[in-house]
Image (cartoon, grey):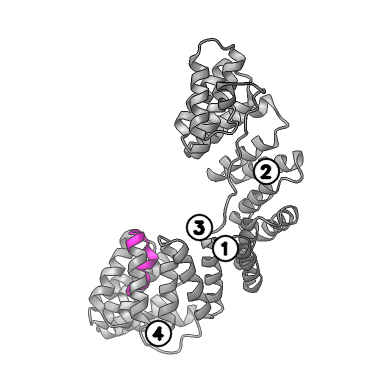
Amino acid sequence: MSIVLTGYVFCVPVLAEISGEWNRCAGKNTTLDQQIDGCTVVIRSGGETPERLVQAFMSRGFAYMTKGDYDLAIQDYDQAIRLDPLNALALNNRGFAYGQKRNFQLAVQDYDSAIRLNPNAALTFYNRGEAHANMRNYNRAIMDYDQAIRLNPNFAQALVNRGFVYFTRGEYDRAIQDYDQAITLTPEVAVAFYNRGVAYAHKGDIDRAIQDYDHAIHLSPQYAWAYYRRGEAYANKRDFDRAIQDYDQTIRLDPNHAAAFNDRGFVRASKGDLEGAIRDYGQAIWLAPDFANAFFNRGSAYTERREFDRAIQDFDQVVRLDPNFVQAFVNRGFVYATEGDYDRAIRDFDEAIRLNPNFAQAFLNRGVARLRNGDPIGGSADIAKAKLLDPSIADHSVR
């Protein structure tokens, strides 16, 4: 997870001032379950007009939505739309429910219909933009956020989400401009500072990133991802002790944060604590068994401890999970070469070079392995190629 979409918006239905079960259905001083029960009584009474039934289905659908019961909410919005096909609010809210179920195609269809009925609804453009962003239709998402902002220039959430899309497209400056504007409108929203911090980090401005993470944490002290990203920033500055403090806090807030365990392990390894690093990598792998980078890092730590069998097992797992992980082939080849298994080492270096034909270190390592395996011509040619690709290479050691 890098940055955050702020989420969909669904609309609260408005019911007239009424009494009895209708008051409960309207959610007046009731729990959500009481609201649902009140609407159910109204719907089953058999004495309501179609217009009033639409209100009841809308209100019950809203209560189900708030509880996260999206299938039941969709059923109620289906009924409301059947009774009133021109109800843009019901279409918007059903689209929201489909989006929460990650059925973005159906969500967009509902938003399209709602917008045809009400082309001035900024919230519906915003929601459709969110659906397009989740489907990676970034150009269409930006068009929808643009329209939402035109209709409501103070729509901070739309600015944050448009910034997210610009960030995803690598347009960091435009993303930062949107976050700046969102922060001006709503300076109490932590996610805008967090997202802007991530954008600054990607631009290499680590100090400004840390300032934004600080602000996000000040506004939301339980914001685990803000601590994680600040830890990452401190690690990039080689301030390892502060990085570990932030990773510790991330894990306290979210004990299932596999990335924090992995990164804390990397920092511990950088400080020479290989045993602690291996424990952290192991926990990351336990939490996320397909976490290729954690296997790679643990394999590298085992290599430093000269536990070569364990290292190879981890590198094996890396290339099973990600056959394009070039450095894993290089590192496994290094271990094979260190153990004197030059044929297998050369095969790994071959694969690394196939994946990245300009990888100087892979040519160097293959060259040294070939020399040691009795192939001076091939070895010398590889070493010359490595130096051509990277003139800074000045020795023949396998690294």
Q: Which mark is residue 1?
A: 3
Q: Are marks 2 and 3 in contact (CB under 8 Å)?
A: no
Tell me the amino acid under the disc marked 2. Answer: Tyr
Q: Are marks 4 and 1 in contact (CB under 8 Å)?
A: no
Mark 3 or mark 4: which comes first in sequence? 3
Residue 149's x, y, as percent?
Answer: 73, 43
Residue carrying label 1:
221
Q: Residues within 10 Å of mark 1 (few under 14, many from 20)?
A: some
- What residue do we see at 55% from left, 75% from top? 234
> Farthest residue in the bottom direction?
395
Tell me the amino acid under the disc marked 4. Answer: Gly
Separation (CA) of disc 2 from disc 4: 48 Å
Q: Which residues are magenta?
A: 286-299
Separation (CA) of disc 1 from disc 2: 29 Å
Q: Which mark is residue 272?
A: 4
Q: Are marks 1 and 3 in contact (CB under 8 Å)?
A: no
Residue carrying label 2:
145
